[in-house]
Amino acid sequence: MKKILIVDDEEMVLVALKDFLENKGYQVITSNQSRGVISTISKEKPDLIIMDFAMPDLSGLDILDTLRNDYSNSTPFILISSFGAREITSNAYQLGADFIEKPIDLDKLSKRVDRLLFVGTAMAS
């Protein structure tokens, strides 16, 4: 069973995404804080990370940058945000992440999750 970590400071987003993805057969771990998320990733070893850009302590982009550059972690990453700024999107793509704007279209999310977890895996083989 594929494991997904969702990090968002909005409880309603965490609950909605967790329920949706668990109903699709994924194991889901959630966190409402960006502080300590690197250790959670090291401990839990998720197959995919979905994280909000705008977090109180460290932004999703900060975490993504740390994972890619300091830890050489290439776990698939989806950055979500209410702010669809081109700079955020461009930076996410440069670091190898996908980007989805809020409010999240669950059908779009489902397709991206499947693509990142299954098609990406098949392509890497």
Image (tube, grey):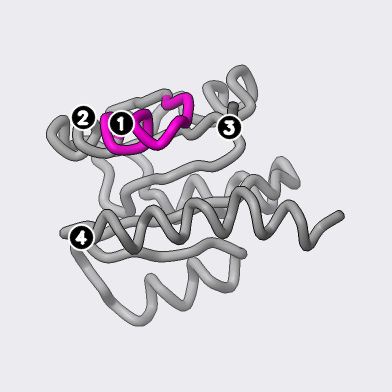
- Residue at the spot x=35%, y=81% of the render? 86
Mark 3, Cα crowd under 10 Å, few <14 / some 14-19 / many 20+, is: few
- Kindly identify the amino acid type of the residue bearing the numbered disc 3: Lys
**Magenta residues, as a range?**
18-28
| Residue at the disc numbered 4 | 102
Q: Nearer the viewer, residue 36 or 42?
A: 42
Q: Position of residue 112 (x, y in %)?
A: 46, 60
Q: Which mark is residue 15?
A: 2
| Residue at the disc numbered 3 | 2
23 is within the stretch colored magenta: yes
Give the structural element (helix, strand or loop) at label 4.
loop
Give the structural element (helix, strand or loop) at label 3.
loop
| Residue at the disc numbered 1 | 18
Discs 2, 1 touching: Cβ within 8 Å? yes
Residue pushed farthest front? 24
First along the sequence among labels 1 and 3: 3
Pick the quarter of the image with the C terminus: bottom right
First along the sequence among labels 4 and 2: 2
- The answer to which quarter of the image holds residue 31 is top left
- Kindly identify the amino acid type of the residue bearing the numbered disc 1: Lys
Q: Which mark is residue 30?
A: none
Q: Nearer the viewer, residue 34 or 108?
A: 108
